[in-house]
Image: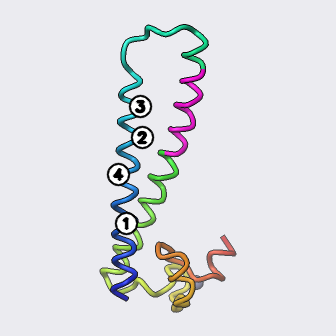
Amino acid sequence: MADRKARLEGLRDELIERIERYRAHKEQRNGPLDKDMEEQAVELQNDEVVDSLENEAEEELHQVMHALGRLESGEGERCEACGEPILPARLEALPYTTLCRECAESR
Ligand SMILES: [Zn+2]
């Protein structure tokens, strides 16, 4: 399953890059406040969107790292809840999953 590891690593790098971009965006925004109220309100809304995108990316990254860790310890193809093998088609579709379909659905 070297393929899956490569996909996970690619996904991890992509997510790290994305999170860095979100952070850079927010840092830039913390500059001097020389804008009118309306402009500030719009930017505040944008910040909230960026925040939630960042949280989402962080959560996904966490899951990817977790899946990579399990892969490295040789448990990557087993469900973390019941220990049954995860179907290859499921791993293909969701490379970062650590649960079989039954367990994922019952959560
Ligand atoms: Zn399971």
The answer to whether the residue bearing label 4 lies less than 8 angstroms from the nearest atom of ligand 1 is: no
What residue sits right under mark 2 in the picture? 22
Helix, strand or loop status at disc 3? helix
Q: In this view, does 30 lie above or below 46?
A: above
Kindly indicate whether the residue at mark 2 contacts the one at mark 3 (C-beta within 8 angstroms): yes
Helix, strand or loop status at disc 4? helix
Whether the magenta-drawn stretch holds residue 48 is answered as: yes
Q: Where is residue 28? Give x, y as percent.
A: 36, 26
Helix, strand or loop status at disc 2? helix
The local crowd at label 1, few if under 14, some if 14 to 19, many if 20 or more residues have their Cα within 10 Å, is some
Q: Which residue is at a point 59% across and 22% down the rendered structure image?
A: 42
Q: What's the amino acid at mark 2?
A: Tyr
Q: Earlier in the sequence, mark 4 or mark 2?
A: 4
What residue sits right under mark 3 in the picture? 26
Between residue 94 and residue 14, name the one nearer to us.
14
Number of the front mark, 2 or 1: 2
Helix, strand or loop status at disc 1? helix
Q: Which of marks 3 and 4 is nearer the N terminus?
A: 4
Q: Which of marks 2 and 1 is nearer the N terminus?
A: 2
Q: Where is residue 37? Give x, y as percent.
A: 58, 9
Between residue 61 and residue 107, name the one nearer to us.
61
- As measured in the structure, the alpha-carbon distance from the residue carrying label 2 to the one carrying label 1 is 19 Å
Q: What's the amino acid at mark 4?
A: Glu
Q: Is residue 32 above or below residue 107?
A: above
Residue 65 - label: 1
Kindly indicate whether the residue at mark 1 contacts the one at mark 2 (C-beta within 8 angstroms): no
Residue 17 - label: 4
Q: Where is residue 102? Give x, y as percent.
A: 66, 82
State left or right for residue 95 relative to residue 9.
right
